[in-house]
Amino acid sequence: MKDFVVPKTQEELQEREAVGVIRASRFVRKFARSRNDIDISSIYAIHKEIFKDVRPNIAGELRREDLSITHSRHRPMHYSHVPAAMIETDKEFKEILGGLKLVPKMAIRGNIKIKNKELKMIQKIVKAAAWIHHKITHIHPFAEGNGRTARLMANLILERYNLIGISVKMERENKNRYLQALSQIDEAGDYKPLISLIFEGMTDRYNGVEKFKIK
């Protein structure tokens, strides 16, 4: 294993972080096509891909300190509670995944007619992606990169079940919607805003697809 060299400038740090996200995105696409089980270890693997050339001391490792989240009222749990929370999340996650089935692969271009049975499964898949996305951001298991890991983990769920991964736009207005959607779950247990954002991202990727209905 090559020796780690600390980035010398902020620009070099940002470049490594960008490369790490690209590498993790490729990892997600490859893992989604595999037959490997998706579970809590997949979250650690994604985080490791992002940070192994940026901050290898935290890559794939649970945090050992308390954190605060900028521009959020949510205060993550004490770091000593994180391991147990992740174990409990793994149990719930496996139950949720057990209720999911592959949907037919859909072309990105052209109009797509979706049967009602398929639509219901698509809704379940997206809800599962939203659930694990929020769990990661709520627990905040890592010292850094929780949001990026959560978004890539959600894509892993979408892509494993034959949907298409999305990119959550993080410009000012969209970022505010995203943070508000997470807060809505924290405060009211309402997943609908986050689910809406995921469906919007899907319709952006599936050119010509009619907007999905959310029940």
Image (cartoon, rainbow, N blue to C red):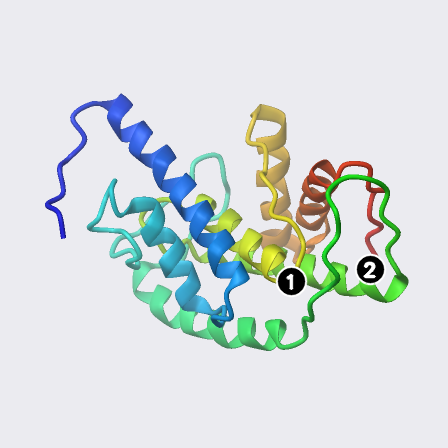
**Quick one: label 1, few (<14), some, or many (20+) residues within 10 Å?**
many
Report x, y in % for residue 194. 66, 47
Would residue 198 appear left or right of 4 to someone viewing this image? right
Asked if residue 5 shows in the view, the reply is: yes
Marks 2 and 1, how far apart at CA: 13 Å
In the displayed structure, 195 sits above or below 54; it is below
Q: Is residue 81 left or right of residue 149?
A: left
66 with respect to 36 (left or right):
left
The image's mark for residue 90 is none
What residue is at 10 percent from the left and 45 percent from the top? 3
Up/down of 67 relative to 63, above or below: above
Give 146 or 138, whichever is nearer the viewer: 146
Residue 75 visible, this angle: no
Across and down, in percent, residue 147 comes to: 46, 45
Q: Quadrant of the C terminus?
A: bottom right
Question: Residue at the location (63% across, 26% down)?
Answer: 173
SS at circle 2: helix
| Residue 16 spot, x, y in % from top left | 30, 34
Q: Quadrant of residue 19?
A: top left
Mark 2 or mark 1, which is nearer to you? Answer: 1
116 to the left or right of 38: right
**Label 2 belongs to which residue?**
119
Q: Which residue is pictured at 51% across the width and 52% down the height? A: 29
Q: Amino acid at mark 1?
A: Tyr
Name the amino acid type tagged 2. Answer: Leu
User: How crowded is the residue under tag 2: few (<14 C-alpha within 10 Å), some, or many (20+)?
Assistant: some
Q: Quadrant of residue 93?
A: bottom right
Q: What kind of element bears circle 1?
A: loop
Identify the residue at horizontal 62%, vertical 31% (top origin).
174
Determine which residue is flagged by label 1: 161
| Coordinates of residue 75 in the picture (x, y in percent) | 44, 49
Label 2 or label 1, whichever comes before in sequence order: 2
